[in-house]
């Protein structure tokens, strides 16, 4: 069943139908566009959600609990899931929406072409009909004129009063009219035959072919819609296996939660390494009191259950702060961490030092590999001078060697600190530079930043290396010896008393641990004098404390402390 034979007279309806088909296709394309926009919005919201809850800290600061790791794994899987939604949106846009819009433009062009051909055929047929109709009307008119001429001629021919010239004239007029009528008849017959032939061609050849082309176009549109329906579903089906893997990954992450492992991590993270405090001895201060025999008081038997005060067992204020978990106030957040991690408990300090040694060892290995590579390249250049100048590599080799020495020095220093924590004697101590020698404090003292360590071998303070712009006139603080001990106030929670004040002659960056940032002309309070190591402990008006190079400041001591002494 074809449109050309069944619908030969429905040109206008087919015009409307084909337009409706294209409109429907574009409507479906709009539906797909809105659907892919929903997918894009959904994927974007999922990615924003993952970004919001992803850890923003460094990996070292992130908790290692299995519950946290599982949650981060779920976030990663959800991020991958969002990526699959983006894939769905992208393929819908390219394979469905884009294809539909391109096909719609092609259909519009093809439909316009077919309809124009149909209109041209109809216009040509109308033109043929007009020619035939005009010839018919002319033939009719000529026949009427010939009939009039015939009647006039007959009337004159029968009239005895008519002259011969009038009769001849009427006869001549009749002949002309009859001849014109015959010509019009022949023209009308020719036009009629031509119109009938064109009409047959129109309704049996031209219009069926045009309508057949419109039918083929509409059927192709229908097939294309079916294909895009299938592609619409296939886009979803292709990502289902990957989405299933994402969901399986979430389930696997949920199964990886281990409460015992998390509890062990808590112990590992917060274990201090200290031993629980022992019993306090009884200190009897009443032994020197004289008692009379008539006193009816119960007295402690002599030499029984009485422990004399032992100065060795007296508890200092600093030591009391270490005995109880919650007995000591937290340090000020302005206090910087020490380079040797002596502000941490022994167990945590050991882990941090070991991690640093491993990191430095990796960096050292990289430098060694780079040095070996440069040396090989240098050998190649020496054997083949045309490839390059061997001397051009020397600065880079020297720089690499310098970096290796620095890294080795850092590793030796951290290994020494690790040995102190583990109670071992470093075998490389005699090879360390003098600037790395640790200076120990008496038992029970804390480091400048509030170390929890009771082992005196773990107590030390290393002021940072800082260049002095007045080296020609002032001692370099890098060559200064470290103080042998700190005052007891360093461990107290109460602020140290002010001994004087000082004025900064130069700016000091204070980037190293334990140091204090100051700018030129800043006025600071002196809370600990220089003990011969080139460093003075000071406090800002804001309460922040730290060490500054003595040669960088002008110091004025209070009279009630050690007299008015000024160091320039």
Image (spheres, rainbow, N blue to C red):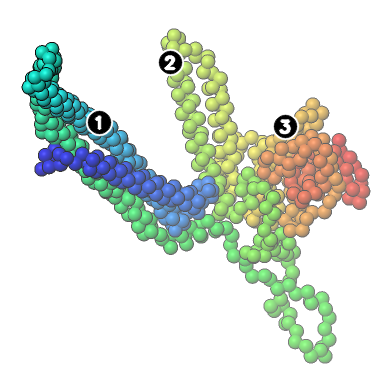
Q: Which residue is mark 3?
A: 467
Residue 529 versus residue 297: which sits nearer the camera? 529
* Mark 1 to mark 3 CA distance (whole Å): 91 Å
Q: Which image quarter holds the N terminus?
A: top left
Q: Quadrant of residue 522?
A: top right
Identity of the residue drawn at 79% across and 29% down: 470
Question: Could you tell me which secondary element the residue under label 2 belongs to?
Answer: helix
Residue 154 in view here = yes
Q: Which image quarter holds the C terminus?
A: top right
Q: In the figure, 312 relative to 238: above or below? A: below
* Mark 3 to mark 2 CA distance (whole Å): 41 Å
Q: Earlier in the sequence, mark 1 or mark 2?
A: 1
Q: Residue furthest left?
A: 158
Q: Residue furthest front?
A: 161
- Mark 1: few/some/many CA within 10 Å (<14, 14-19, 20+): few
Question: Could you tell me which secondary element the residue under label 3 belongs to?
Answer: loop
Identity of the residue drawn at 65% across and 46% down: 338
């Amino acid at each position: 069943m074809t449109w050309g034979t069944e619908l030969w007279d429905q040109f206008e309806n087919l015009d409307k139908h084909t337009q409706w088909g294209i409109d429907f296709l574009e409507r479906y394309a709009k539906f797909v566009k809105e659907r892919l926009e929903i997918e894009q919005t959904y994927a974007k919201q999922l990615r924003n959600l993952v970004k919001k809850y992803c850890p923003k800290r460094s990996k070292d600061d992130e908790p290692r609990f299995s519950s946290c790791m599982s949650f981060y794994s779920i976030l990663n899987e959800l991020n991958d899931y969002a990526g699959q939604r983006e894939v769905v949106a992208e393929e819908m846009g390219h394979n469905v929406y884009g294809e539909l819009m391109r096909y719609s433009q092609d259909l519009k062009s093809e439909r316009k072409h077919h309809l124009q051909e149909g209109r041209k055929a109809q216009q040509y047929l109308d033109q043929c009909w007009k020619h035939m109709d005009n010839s018919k009307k002319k033939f009719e008119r000529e026949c009427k004129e010939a009939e009039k001429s015939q009647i006039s001629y007959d009337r004159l021919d029968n009239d005895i009063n008519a002259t011969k010239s009038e009769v001849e004239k009427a006869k001549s007029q009749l002949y002309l009219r009859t001849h014109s009528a015959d010509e019009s008849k022949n023209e009308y017959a020719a036009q009629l035959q031509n119109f009938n032939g064109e009409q047959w061609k129109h309704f049996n050849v031209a219009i069926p072919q045009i309508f057949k082309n419109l039918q083929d176009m509409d059927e192709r549109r229908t097939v294309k819609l079916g294909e895009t329906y299938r592609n619409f579903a296939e886009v979803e089906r292709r990502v289902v296996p990957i989405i299933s893997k994402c969901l399986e990954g979430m389930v696997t992450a949920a199964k990886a939660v281990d409460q015992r492992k998390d509890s062990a991590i808590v112990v590992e993270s917060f274990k201090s390494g200290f031993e629980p405090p022992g019993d306090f001895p009884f200190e009897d201060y009443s032994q020197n009191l004289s008692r009379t025999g008539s006193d009816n008081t119960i007295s402690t038997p002599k030499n029984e259950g009485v422990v004399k005060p032992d100065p060795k067992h007296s508890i200092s204020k600093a030591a009391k702060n270490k005995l109880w978990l919650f007995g000591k106030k937290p340090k000020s957040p302005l206090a910087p961490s020490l380079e040797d991690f002596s502000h941490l408990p022994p167990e945590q300090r050991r882990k941090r030092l070991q991690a640093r040694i491993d990191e430095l060892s990796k960096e050292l290995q990289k430098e060694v590999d780079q040095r070996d590579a440069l040396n090989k390249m240098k050998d190649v250049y020496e054997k083949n001078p045309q490839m390059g100048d061997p001397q051009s590599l020397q600065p880079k080799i020297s720089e690499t060697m310098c970096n290796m020495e620095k890294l080795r020095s850092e590793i030796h220093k951290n290994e020494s600190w690790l040995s102190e924590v583990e109670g071992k004697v470093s075998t490389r101590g005699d090879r360390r530079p003098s600037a790395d020698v640790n200076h120990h404090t008496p038992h029970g003292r804390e480091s400048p930043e509030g170390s929890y360590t009771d082992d005196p071998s773990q107590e030390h303070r290393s002021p940072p290396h800082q260049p002095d712009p007045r080296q020609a006139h002032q001692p370099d603080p890098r060559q200064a010896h470290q103080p042998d001990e700190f005052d007891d106030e360093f461990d107290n929670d109460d602020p140290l008393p002010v001994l004087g004040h000082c004025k900064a002659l130069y700016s000091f960056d204070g980037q190293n641990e334990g140091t204090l940032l100051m700018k030129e002309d800043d006025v600071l309070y002196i809370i600990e004098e220089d003990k011969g190591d080139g460093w003075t402990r000071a406090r800002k008006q804001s309460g922040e404390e730290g060490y500054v190079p003595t040669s960088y400041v002008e110091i004025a001591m209070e009279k009630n402390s050690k007299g008015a002494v000024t160091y320039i």
